[in-house]
Amino acid sequence: MHKDEYVIETDKLAKTYPGGIKAVKGIDMKIQRGQIYGFLGPNGAGKTTTIKMLSTSIKPTSGTARVMGYDISKDSMKVRKVIGVVPQDLTTDEDLKGIENMELVGRFYDIPPRESRKKAEELLDLVDLTEFGNKYVSTYSGGMRKRLELIVGLIHNPKVLFLDEPTLGLDVQTRTKMWEYIRKVKEEFGMTIVLTSHYLEEVDELADIISIIDHGQIVVTGTPEELKNSLQGDIIEATFSDSMQSKKFGEYSKSVDVTYPKENVVRMKVKDSDMEVPHIMKYMSDNNLSPIRFSISKPSLDQVFLDYTGREIREEEAGDTRKAQMNMRRLRK
Amino acid sequence: MSGLLPLTGRELKKWYRNMVFFITGLLQPIFWIALFGSAFDIAKFLPHSALENTFGTTSYITFIIGGVLTSTSLFTALFSGTSIIFDRRLGNMARFLVSPIHRSSIVFAKVLSTTVRILVQAVILIGVAFIIPNGLILSNGISLLGIFIITAALIMVAFSFSSIFSIIAIRLKRQETIFGIINLINLPLLFASYALFPPSFMPAWLRNVAAYNPVSWSSQAIRNVILNGTLTGSVLNSTLEYMLYLLLLTIFMLVLVYFVSEKEIRD
Ligand SMILES: Nc1ncnc2c1ncn2[C@@H]1O[C@H](COP(=O)(O)OP(=O)(O)OP(=O)(O)O)[C@@H](O)[C@H]1O
Ligand SMILES: [Mg+2]
């Protein structure tokens, strides 16, 4: 593979399930080596379907994709050799021990047993499961199983790692810990990671590039910063002790939106606060304005999501909780 | 065929580790032989000469051992199908499908491990048949060819039946469905065959149906060996004919499993 080629490249990739559900409606994307690429979208957006196509477990209805230069339909065996996959649902065998699960998967890749065991021990250590390697998976907690899933997908040193909702159903602390592991994996093994999530904080935290996907289509792609900046609106809010000053401050520039949410409070929407604030400072000192409160807020991914999909990702939360519970039940079973 | 050995190893490991499952699997043939042998012991009702004429032996167990071995295979083969469904439901299948293994090796591993289990059951069953009262008698001895025929027949039956149940399960998500299908076909397969009674006991229509039933082929082939010891003449020919049918069926099923599973298996 040439340096300038993309690790993953798709061309109008689409999947219609039997029954006519158009789960993915033509996705074009390019993913560079070493990136963490985040797929953000609500339940049913088509994230899992996309991952399943890219990881060759289902065939696209139309369109093509290349992973590490191999066509996912024609060269699926070669694709499988270079990818690691952590599916949304659990895949490890409860009747086997943690390490046995890893060794089994190691044998799928023809890794010699000795090497496979060494690698398995290393990976168990990476996610703090060393003491549990020799225990049956049926005795693991939900969080432990998710950690095991993560490393099972890594036993063969894949070049590309697909993580489908790696923290679904985990509590906040475990989730933060999982992020740490994912970052370690990226740093230690230099992998390209494709991550799906419907947690905004998660992609914001981990991803270098984000695509927001909704109803089977990518609505926007960019770095978290770019996406936030694309809203063209950092909010600057200043509170003054009297209306004279607030009025004067409001006259700062004709080219910015000014509103007065409360008495003596001025809110400005500026394109790029980093560029604008020095000018504002100068204006204030020139006019002897001294605010008693001054804040700059950059837009959050929440707003980005709302802006591009027309709804809040939280609206999905009701369904999400149910799903998380179901997942936990499965984790426990 | 990458994946076949590790996956077969996994199946067998899960089998012998699950003690309850392991032991019930071994008890099943013992129950079969003990119950069939005594409940249907026709030796009680018929004079010895009549028994010799229709069954070729005065011990009913000796007569039905081929049938019991075959039907035990039939019932054990069902696990190939159910465990494919379990792998799908428990998520293991998703892992197999993204691994660089042939999709057919997932199914062949089921078929292979089930065959191993069936052979272990067969050995136990034959052992028990020998030791119970009025049990298995090899009055004409047994030849090396005979042992080979019994083993080969059982392997082919195991392969074929496991393949059939695996193909049924290849897209199924619910165990209930396969149990329904199995209840529908297993007993007819057993009773519309020469497993428990000789063809002469059957009405003509049933006899004709049974002639096409693989359960009959294997039961009769094994029975011929057990009753006759060394095979000669027409008995040898008919035995080889049954073996040929079984071989054709096995080859057909293996090819079918290969193509169907490579193409159709889903998570
Ligand atoms: N096997 C299937 N058969 C039919 N429809 C399916 C199948 N799998 C998914 N779908 C449908 O395709 C759409 C996309 O599903 P997908 O699982 O890709 O979404 P997702 O973005 O991963 O959602 P989630 O956040 O809930 O995991 C949904 O409408 C879903 O109902
Ligand atoms: Mg999903």
Image (cartoon, coloured by chain):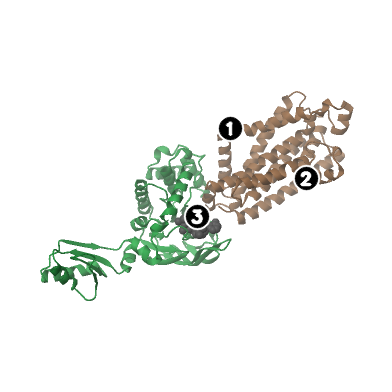
Answer above or below: position of B214 versus A14: above
Residue B21 image-quadrant placement: top right
Alpha-carbon distance for marks 3 and 1? 38 Å
Answer above or below: position of A75 versus B166: below
* Amino acid found under the numbered disc labelled 1: Val
Alpha-carbon distance for marks 3 and 2? 44 Å
Give the residue furthest to the top.
Answer: B133
Disc 2 target residue: B213
* Amino acid found under the numbered disc labelled 2: Asn
Q: Which chain carries label 1?
A: B
* Amino acid found under the numbered disc labelled 3: Lys
Q: Do the residues labelled 3 and 1 touch (CB within 8 Å)?
A: no
Q: Using the rendered image, report if marks 3 and 2 lie on a common chain.
A: no
Image check: B218 left or right of A178?
right
Comparing labels 3 and 2, the label whose residue is closer to the camera: 2
Q: Chain B in the picture: what colour?
A: brown
Most foreground residue, B190 or B132: B190
Answer above or below: position of B154 versus B131: below
Disc 1 target residue: B20
Q: Are marks 2 and 1 in contact (CB under 8 Å)?
A: no
Q: Callout 3: helix, strand or loop? A: helix
Give the residue furthest to the bottom.
Answer: A254
Disc 3 target residue: A81
Q: Mark 3 lies on which chain?
A: A
Q: Chain A in the picture: what colour?
A: green
Q: Callout 1: helix, strand or loop? A: helix
